[in-house]
Amino acid sequence: MTALWKGIPDRAKGDLSSFPESHRLATRHRAGWRVRPRSRDRASTEQGGNPPMIRSIVSTSLSYRLLVLVVAALLVFLGVRQMQGVALDVLPEFKPPTVEVRTEALGLSAAEVEEIITTPIEKDLLPGMPWLDTYYSESLPGLSRIVLVFEPGTDPMHARQLVQERLTAAFGLPNAADRPPEMLQPLSSTNRVLMVRLSSQELSPIEMSVLARWTIRPRLLAVPGVANVSIWGQRERQLQVRVDPETLHEHGVTLQQVIETTGNALWVSPLTFVEASTPGSGGFIDTPQQRLGIYHRSPIRTAEDLAQVILEGEQGQTPAADGQPLRLGDIAQVVEDHQLLIGDAVAEEGPAGLILMIEKLPWANTLEVTRGVEQALAELQPGLPGIQIDPTIFRPASYIELSLANLNRSLLLSLLLVALVLAFFLFEWRSALISIVAIPLSLMAAALVLAVRDATVNTMVLAGFIIAIGVVVDDAIIDIENIVRRLRQARRAGSTKSTQAIILDASLEIRDRLIFGTVAILIMLVPIL
């Protein structure tokens, strides 16, 4: 500074007005000289290279401190309310809106299902379907399956309504179809919420299947959010008539006679072409006081009862052997058994049993559905003696609970570490409090963003929260430390600058570095999005 002053001619030392502005940089300061920056250089230094918008936000926040506190408190309150009702899932919903149509046709081969059922339904469903992206179909023995995939963003309920309208207008399917085409319940990409294993040392697989079908499954379907309950390894109780062709030939009986006799002997039959498939009214009896309805109780309940049924003849005559009418037990083996199994439910250890696959609706909360199903199973357990229930085979809610526990642990540890670091190194309890408040405030702001976007909180979001806690803690500590340091320096120097101005300059001084560091972290995480 002295050299700069010496470069000025002696006659001009008392008057600097004759020099250009670019030369008037030296001013007297106590015992020495210093360079005073021009106005535009000083403004650039105070802003620290920050955009005017950043400076305006920080300055406005400092000027309206009470308003900022009220908004922050309101933000935390709304965030807590939203987090209480937010949907929790394992993974985000990445599956586009899908509608699946199934048609059962027992007894038809795959080629017949393709020709008689699948192709005609496709011709009625697909032409002109709005927002339909793609589709695929599958024809199996006895089953037709058509899956329609709609464009992303399509309302699932609207898509189902469109499909239902087309199904209503579809032509009548042949009698080979056991029931009309039906749409499955809407399912999410992670629709399986629980697998429950049923086993028993006392009950047979058929008895256990009856309980699962008529007692357990209806109760679980009543749990809010449950879309479907599939029973793997189910063995339906059946009265089977096993025919020997040679025995039929010896007695001159056809297979059609056996089928019609068996079907009509039952009060209700799954065979659609026999009279028992559509039982009529039992009639009524009129008394002087009232009319009583007649309820027919089927006398056939066991295989022995069915074996005593007399065989029907083709011309209305009853086939006979040695003068005695032929019965089903004379020409066939009548037993109680289950259907032929295509697959089975297999567990790692223990006796063979059943597996219940519980699926949820797309908008359902995985954690709430899981707890609701477990509560329903606990209520059913006293009424299911001899059956062991194991709901731990597959439980995605465990991952969510673990992620929530990790988030809570990270939150508590970060709060503790921030408090200790700022208390022991800065000796400012108010600074520690500010940094601690910044952590839940940022998380609640993120929760509100998720609520506005109607997004679910999944394990990926929770992992992002954990990473964000580290970023928030780091930024808060750096910002508070720099502000405290600048305030102490101003006190030691006896500066007349206001505290608000010092805080503003100190915050803007490192703002660009914090922003660049946060952007770098975001860029690093882009590949996993």
Image (cartoon, grey):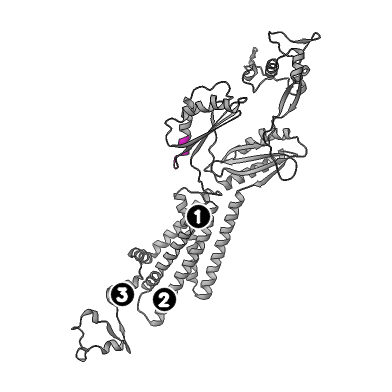
Give the answer, above or below, for where 338 lies relative to 492. Answer: above
The kind of residue tagged 1 is Ile
Density class for disc 3 (Cα within 10 Å; few <14, some 14-19, many ≥20) is few
**Would residue 123 be seen by someone viewing this image from the given angle?**
yes
Q: Which of label 1 and label 3 is nearer to you?
A: 1
Q: Residue furthest right?
A: 322
In three-dimensional space, the C-alpha distance between marks 1 and 3, rounded to whole angstroms, equals: 43 Å
The kind of residue tagged 3 is Arg
Density class for disc 1 (Cα within 10 Å; few <14, some 14-19, many ≥20) is few
In three-dimensional space, the C-alpha distance between marks 2 and 3, rounded to whole angstroms, equals: 17 Å
User: Which segment did they paint magenta?
Assistant: 152-159
Q: Which of label 2 and label 3 is nearer to you?
A: 3
Counting from the top left corner in percent of width and height, residue 308 is at 77, 17
Pointer 1 or 3: first along the chain: 3
The residue wearing badge 2 is 486
Name the quadrant containing residue 380: top right
The residue wearing badge 1 is 528
Of residue 197 and residue 347, the one placed in the foreground of this image is 347
Residue at image position (54%, 65%) is: 414
Give the answer, above or below, for where 333 lies relative to 474. Answer: above
In three-dimensional space, the C-alpha distance between marks 2 and 1, rounded to whole angstroms, equals: 40 Å
